[in-house]
Amino acid sequence: MVGRVRTGIPGMDEVLHGGIPERNVVLLSGGPGTGKTIFSQQFLWGGIQNGEPGIYVALEEHPLQVRGNMAGFGWDVRKYEEEGLFAMVDAFTAGVGKSREYERYIVHDLTDIKEFIDVLRTAIKDIGAKRVVIDSVTTLYINKPAMARSVVMQLKRVLAGLGVTGILVSQISAGERGFGGPGVEHGVDGIIRLDLDEIDGKLKRSLIVWKMRGTSHSMRRHPFEITDRGIVVYPDRVLMRKTVVELD
């Protein structure tokens, strides 16, 4: 039996029929404003509360901003960094400014995927990480889309090989039907897609599990909300084209 990783997101484990299978690398895909970063950070926080060390790879925000945003939801990771339960990989500043004084793990050249993986591997081994979030993986191949699947496969080999369950945040444009890069959907174990749609004159958030190796899962589109304590998914509701329907 494959072990399950609880997401720490209310309602999400019900959608996944028990959680994400261990060592799965999941693509978390969505357009702007859908809640991808919050979802991924909440996943890490849930692991920390369960004694599972986690790593957040910051590719699009300054590490200080990431810590501040997480604290805004009540997820203050600073003491857990000191305890070795959480680590930040700075792939944003390239070590420019004061980051080189404060950040332990820094990627200096984002065009060098080998350096990126080496820094990530070191961080995973140092704290014995069980969960890793890369936000967003799209940044690694945005200027070379033909490399998308290759980059994802390299990351998958490292994460799964080290016994890590990973979330790769993937950016798509509003209304885009794909998942954020040619072939990436075939290189991952799971895909969770977050959407923001206008329904009856209001914007509503929803998610659907497109695939997840190693487990059955809901095949329906479920609404979710972003609260001041993070994301809440409603597994007993289905978002239809024009309305939200309660399930029996």
Image (tube, helix red, strand yellow):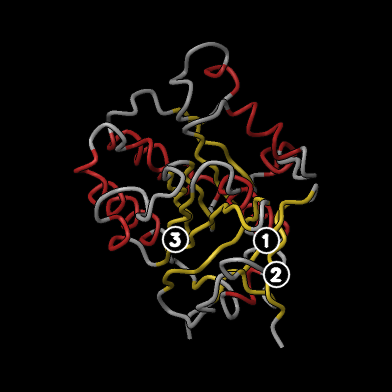
SS assignment at label 3:
strand
Mark 2 and mark 1 in contact? Answer it, CB < 8 Å. yes
**Vertical comparison of 44 with 248: above or below:** above
State left or right for residue 160 relative to residue 30.
left
Mark 3 and mark 2 in contact? Answer it, CB < 8 Å. no
Which residue is located at x 48 percent, y 62 percent?
A: 192
Q: Which residue is mark 1?
A: 224
First-in-chain label (3 vs 2): 3
**Vertical comparison of 164 with 148: above or below:** below
Q: Residues within 10 Å of mark 3 (few under 14, many from 20)?
A: many
Q: Which residue is mark 2?
A: 234
Mark 1 and mark 3 in contact? Answer it, CB < 8 Å. no
Give the CA separation, mark 2 to mark 1: 6 Å
State left or right for residue 41 relative to residue 72.
left
Give the CA separation, mark 1 to mark 3: 19 Å
Instruction: Tell me the quadrant of the picture where the C terminus can be found.
Output: bottom right
State left or right for residue 118 relative to residue 41.
left
SS assignment at label 1:
strand
First-in-chain label (2 vs 1): 1
Q: Nearer the viewer, residue 168 or 76?
A: 168
Q: Amino acid at mark 2?
A: Tyr
Q: Residues within 10 Å of mark 2 (few under 14, many from 20)?
A: many
Which residue is located at x 56 percent, y 67 percent?
A: 241
**Vertical comparison of 242 with 101: above or below:** below
Image location (x, y in percent) of residue 95: 47, 18
**Vertical comparison of 207 with 136: above or below:** below
The label shown at residue 26 is 3
Which residue is located at x 30 percent, y 48 percent?
A: 181
Q: Amino acid at mark 1?
A: Phe
Q: Amino acid at mark 3?
A: Val
Q: Residues within 10 Å of mark 1 (few under 14, many from 20)?
A: many
Image location (x, y in percent) of residue 23: 44, 66
